[in-house]
Image (spheres, rainbow, N blue to C red):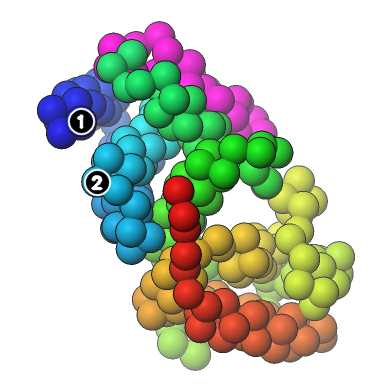
Amino acid sequence: MEELLKKMHNWMDDYMARFVTDDEEVMQGIRIKMIHTGYVTKIARELAQHLKLTTHDVQLAEVMGLFHDVGRFRQYSLYKTFNDAQSEDHADLGLKVLTEEMPYMAELSPEDEVVVRFAIRNHNKKEIEPTEDFRKLVFARLLRDADKLDIYRVLSPYLVPDGAQKAPNFVPSDASQLVSPDFVRDFAEGKQADYHRLRTHGDRKLVRLMWVYDVNYSWTLRKMVERGYVDLIIKYLPEQEGLDEGIRRLREYIKEKCAAEDRVDL
């Protein structure tokens, strides 16, 4: 498996290099995806080790992290956007890329390839598709956690309008910063919001905060808290009626979840 991993890493490096361009505007997006790929690969491996998975399964988690966003590069090449709703689901597109262009998937055992594909297909969906295969669920949850943990890093600079992060006491007042009433209600009830209803910048901030309820392992949530991602989003939420209840509920949930022990028996 170690040799296979090396070949996969080399292939992915070469594949991403195909999208390097002199157009700096395009490269900003490509560069973000390249760096994100590296971080998610590392996080997936660390989380697998924390869960005390076997050496083989730790390496399998690394494979999933490495290829989870491979579809992003073709997506941008074809559609000039990373917006799935305006183009194509990037996880599904990534599986096509692996089928059509990546020669080493066949070197995985059939059982491992099924698990890898399941995790990648479900890493960006609102919910993991139903399955009675516990092994699939463990890896899908692991990859979703690894992806979310790094997405918080990626998105942190964009929580406020351009330049606002330079002003420590910035308080958003523009209407676009307000959260839609239905999102406030969902947040107060501890529910996930429907991404398709996003209307304002405030909605986007709140949805990112509500991802906390979709974190599977306490290790991941502790990392999010330690790195200040949760408090940063809360800091830049608008002063708006109803949000305090959601924040109180969220903090209680985080405290309970972080105190829990992660146990996985494969």
Q: Position of residue 19 (x, y in %)?
A: 29, 25
User: Against 79, is 240 above or below?
Assistant: below
Residue tagged 2 = 55
- Residue at left 15%, top 34%? 2
Q: Is residue 193 left or right of residue 145?
A: right
Magenta segment main secondary structure: helix
The front one of 178 and 233 is: 233
Question: Pointers 1 and 2 in contact (CB under 8 A)?
Answer: yes
Q: Is residue 224 magenta?
A: no
Using the numbered discs, state the Cα–Cα distance from disc 1 to disc 2 in whole angstroms.
10 Å
User: Against 257, is 202 above or below?
Assistant: above
Q: Earlier in the sequence, mark 1 or mark 2?
A: 1
Q: Is residue 243 left or right of residue 96?
A: right
Residue tagged 1 = 1
Residue numbers of the magenta segment: 82-105
The front one of 102 and 161 is: 102
Neighbour tally class for label 2: few under 14, some 14-19, many 20 plus, Cα within 10 Å: some
Q: Is residue 98 magenta?
A: yes
Could you tell me the amino acid type at mark 2?
Answer: Thr
- Element assignment for label 2: helix
Work out which quarter of the rendered image holds the N terminus and state it. Answer: top left
Which labelled disc corresponds to residue 28? none
Residue 229 seen in render: no
Q: Position of residue 85 (x, y in %)?
A: 66, 34
Q: Position of residue 51 (x, y in %)?
A: 38, 60
Q: Where is residue 178, by image quadrant?
A: bottom right
- Residue at left 33%, top 38%? 60
